[in-house]
Amino acid sequence: MKQDVNIIGFLCNWCSYAGADLTGLSRIVYPTNIKIIRIPCTGRMDPVLIMEAFHNGADGVLVSGCHPGDCHYTEGNYYWRRRHAALKRLLEFFGIDERRFQATWVSASEGKRFAEVVKKVVDDVRDWKKDE
C-alpha cells in the first residue's frame, strides 16, 4: 500500500488499541499509513500533542477511544468529547482543514470497524492533499 500520507493515531488502551490489535489478529487489511500511539484514555489526551503532531509533519491525526458510556475510567471519553469540540475550532482558526483531524469511537471487539475508520481517514487526508 502507498505511504503517501502520514497519519498519527492516538488510541485509548482499553478499547481502540485493543480493536486495532483485533484487526491485526483477524488479518484484516487496512492502510499502513497510520502510526499508532497508545494512550491510557482519550480523557487524558492533551490537545498540545495533536498540535505537535501537525507541527512535526503529520498529514492527519486520528483520536479514537471507547464508546460513550463504556469508558474504562467511567467518563474520560466525555471529557475528550468536550475537548474535541474546542480543538476543532482552534484547528480551524489555524487553517488546518477539518479532513486532517478526526475522532471516533471503536471498541475492543470492532476490529473490522477500526480498519474502516483508518481507511476513511487515509482517504480523507489524501483528498485534502490533492486539493492543497
Image: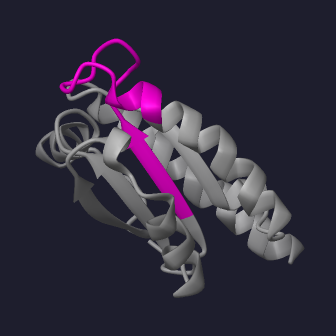
Tell me what residue is drawn at x 86 percent, y 78 percent: 132
Question: Is 48 or 95 nearer to us in this picture?
Answer: 48
Residue 40 placement (x, y as % from top left)? 20, 47
Question: Is 4 or 83 nearer to us in this picture?
Answer: 83
Q: In the rendered structure, which segment of residues is drawn in magenta? A: 61-79
For residue 74: magenta?
Answer: yes
Residue 63 placement (x, y as % from top left)? 45, 49
Tell me what residue is drawn at x 78 percent, y 66 percent: 128
Corner quadrant of residue 12:
top left
Left or right: 20 as drawn, with respect to 60: left
Corner quadrant of residue 71:
top left
Question: Is 118 or 58 nearer to us in this picture?
Answer: 58
Residue 39 placement (x, y as % from top left)? 24, 53
Tell me what residue is drawn at x 77 percent, y 50 percent: 89
Corner quadrant of residue 10:
bottom left
In the rendered view, would you say 111 is above or below 99?
Answer: above
Tell me what residue is drawn at x 58 percent, y 84 percent: 55
Left or right: 101 as drawn, with respect to 108: right
* Residue found at the far left of this picture: 25
In the rendered view, would you say 104 is above or below 89?
Answer: above
Residue 124 placement (x, y as % from top left)? 69, 55
